[in-house]
Image (cartoon, helix red, strand yellow):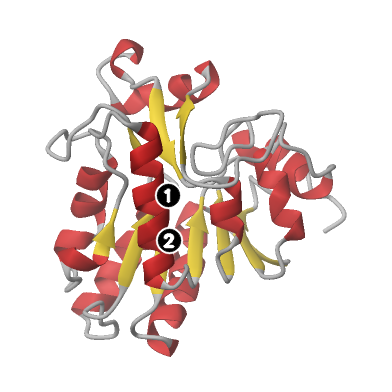
Amino acid sequence: MKLYRAKDYYDMSRKAANIISAQIIMKPNCVLGLATGSTPVGAYKQLIEWYHKGDLDFSRVKTANLDEYKGLNRDNDQSYYCFMKQNLFKHVNIDEANTHIPDGMEADAVKEAARYEEILKNLGGIDLQILGLGHNGHIGFNEPSDIFPKDTHIVDLQESTIEANKRFFASADQVPRQAYTMGIGTIIRAKKILLMVSGEDKAEILHTALCGPVTPKVPASILQLHPDVIIVADEAALSKWETI
C-alpha cells in the first residue's frame, strides 16, 4: 500500500485527481472504475478543470461504476447515472457508449448481475478502481457480512448507510433500500485501487479497515490483500494513525 497524506479535502481531491489523470495519460483507452457520493466530487471537478485546459482527453476512456440504487431510473436526479452525468460526464469529451452503470430498473437481480459482470469482462478488467469508504467499512455497497461477495449482486442497505445517504434525499423514507453493486471479488480484480478518505468521522473505520484483521465484517479490510492500493486521505481521516 502507498499512503499519501493530504492537508484537507481540497488537497485530497487534487492528489487523487493527479493519480487518475496519470492513468489516463499513460493509457488513453484505460478503464476507470468510478465511485459516487461526496468523496470523489472534488477530484472530478479537478479532472474537468484540467480537461478544459487541454491537459486531459477522455475520448477513448471507458468507465464502469461501482453501483446503482435499485428502483431509480436514469432520469431520477438521485440515480448514480444522473450523478455521474452532472459531476463528470457532461463536462468532458467522454463517449456515453463507453460509460457503464448497473441498471437500477432491472427487477431480475440475477440477470442484471450477470449482465454487468459480462460488461466488465468484455472491457478487459478495470485499470484503476476509485473507492470511497463507508462509516461501517463498506466499499461500493458491500455491507458488513459473513462472507466477501464474489461478483456483482444486489444488497439490502443497512440503516447506517441509509442514514448516511439520506442527506441527498428529501427524507430517509425516500432512500432506496436496495442497490446493485460490484462484489468484493469484482473490486479486487482491478489492477490498481485508489481509496479516497476525508474527515475525522472516517478516522476510526479507516484505521480498523487497514490495520485490523481482514474480515467481511469490515469489507474494506480486503484491500490489505490487494497488491497495488493507493490511499489518499486528509489529516482528519488519518488522526488515528499516530505511528504513520
Residue indicated by mark 1:
66
Q: Residue 134 at x, y = what percent?
A: 56, 37
- Under circle 1, the secondary element is loop
Q: In this view, does 173 lie above or below 47?
A: above
Q: What residue type is labelled 1?
A: Leu
Between residue 53 and residue 164, name the one nearer to us: 164
Q: Is residue 65 above or below residue 77?
A: below
Say few, some or many: other residues with alpha carbon within 10 Å of mark 1 (under 14 / 14 to 19 / 20 or more): many
Residue indicated by mark 2:
33
Q: Which residue is located at x 52 percent, y 53 percent?
A: 131
Q: Residue 52 at x, y = what percent?
A: 19, 76
Q: In this view, does 93 lie above or below 34?
A: below
* Residue at mark 1 to residue at mark 2: CA–CA distance: 7 Å
Question: Residue 122 falls in which quadrant of the image?
Answer: bottom left
Image quadrant in which the C terminus is located: bottom right
Q: Residue 146 at x, y = what percent?
A: 71, 29
Q: Which residue is located at x 58 percent, y 37 percent?
A: 138
Say few, some or many: other residues with alpha carbon within 10 Å of mark 2 (under 14 / 14 to 19 / 20 or more): many
Mark 2 or mark 1, which is nearer the start of the sequence?
A: 2
